[in-house]
Image: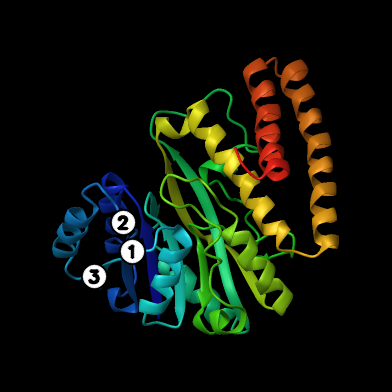
Amino acid sequence: MVSIVVATYNRCNFLEDCIKSYEEQNCDKSLFEVLIIDNNSTDDTEIISKEVIEKYSELDVRYMIEPNQGLSYGRNRGIKESKYDLIHFFDDDAVATPNYISAIIDTFERYPKAKAAGGKILLNYLEGRPSWASVYMESIFGLFDIGDAEMEFPRKNYPRGSNMTFKRELFDEVGYFDVSLGRKGKIMLGGEEKEMFQRVYEFGASVIYNPLIVCYHAVPESRTRMDFMRNQVVGIGVSENIRINNSAFSHKAKRYFMEGVKWGATLLLFAKYLFLEFNFPKAVLIVRFRWWISKGILLGHS
């Protein structure tokens, strides 16, 4: 029924918890497989993967190496190697809730015309939530929650990388992930999911949001450091630059206009955090966050 694709790069310390969460699923284990796609890791990913396969032997887990560097290459390899008609993408530093697979299968059974689906991604701060954190910034850590109502995704939104499922046929209809986008080793690009769903929506496919498909994304202290966040957020902007440069002029103009709108919203949030919450670090960081993205969009580099 479901192929779980876990593309991984140098996160062996998270991998066992990730796979263990599938061993704890409340459904028949024969309903899914897990593919670990090692994207040239230099840590103990191969060793840990083989240990996990042996430890959770009742699961159908396969390990393989994708030599072409990049998350999009890893995901595309997973599509080709998977055996089921539903292909789900999951991050190596996330854990699934016990009814995860059941909720995915149920979604497509109730919405047979849907071509893709996604759910909630909540955060697990390993060293506590920083005082400057806000829901407007936590998307860089993976947060995705648009409420508790099941719905068809509005065209302005889309499932995120650690919780998105596609019917296999959709890749034949719109193509695979764009390998010019997405993280490549230590190069923090992104945008591959946004670009994919742009094609999905242009094709006219229905995409369902099910709030019962829930996973938790780990946020170690290292990801909350300023240098890491700056590199990641500038990378988001650079990815947008790459994505819109391959688009029509009208799409570019719309994206630049929206960046201006987002600056307006950012300044309103700055005032709120500074004058109503008296949280200067939070106020300053929301502006820096937007500046980093704009810099990446305009310059195309860090």
Disc 3 to disc 1: CB gap under 8 Å: no
> What is the x, y in percent for residue 1?
40, 81
The structure residue drawn at horizontal position 44% and vertical position 49%, both measured from the top left corner, is 216
The structure residue drawn at horizontal position 81% and vertical position 60%, both measured from the top left corner, is 251
Disc 2 to disc 1: CB gap under 8 Å: yes
Dot 2 surroundings within 10 Å: few (below 14), some, or many (20 or more)?
A: some
Q: Picture quarter containing residue 153?
A: bottom right
Q: Which residue is mark 3?
A: 59
Q: Amino acid at mark 1?
A: Pro
Between disc 3 and disc 1, the foreground one is 1
The structure residue drawn at horizontal position 34% and vertical position 71%, both measured from the top left corner, is 27
The structure residue drawn at horizontal position 57% and vertical position 81%, both measured from the top left corner, is 170
The tag on residue 67 is 1
> What is the x, y in percent for residue 109?
53, 81
Q: Amino acid at mark 3?
A: Leu
The tag on residue 109 is none
For label 1, the SS is loop
Between disc 2 and disc 3, the foreground one is 2
Q: Which residue is at the front of the view, 15 or 100?
A: 15
Q: Which residue is mark 2?
A: 40
Q: How many marks?
A: 3
For label 2, the SS is loop
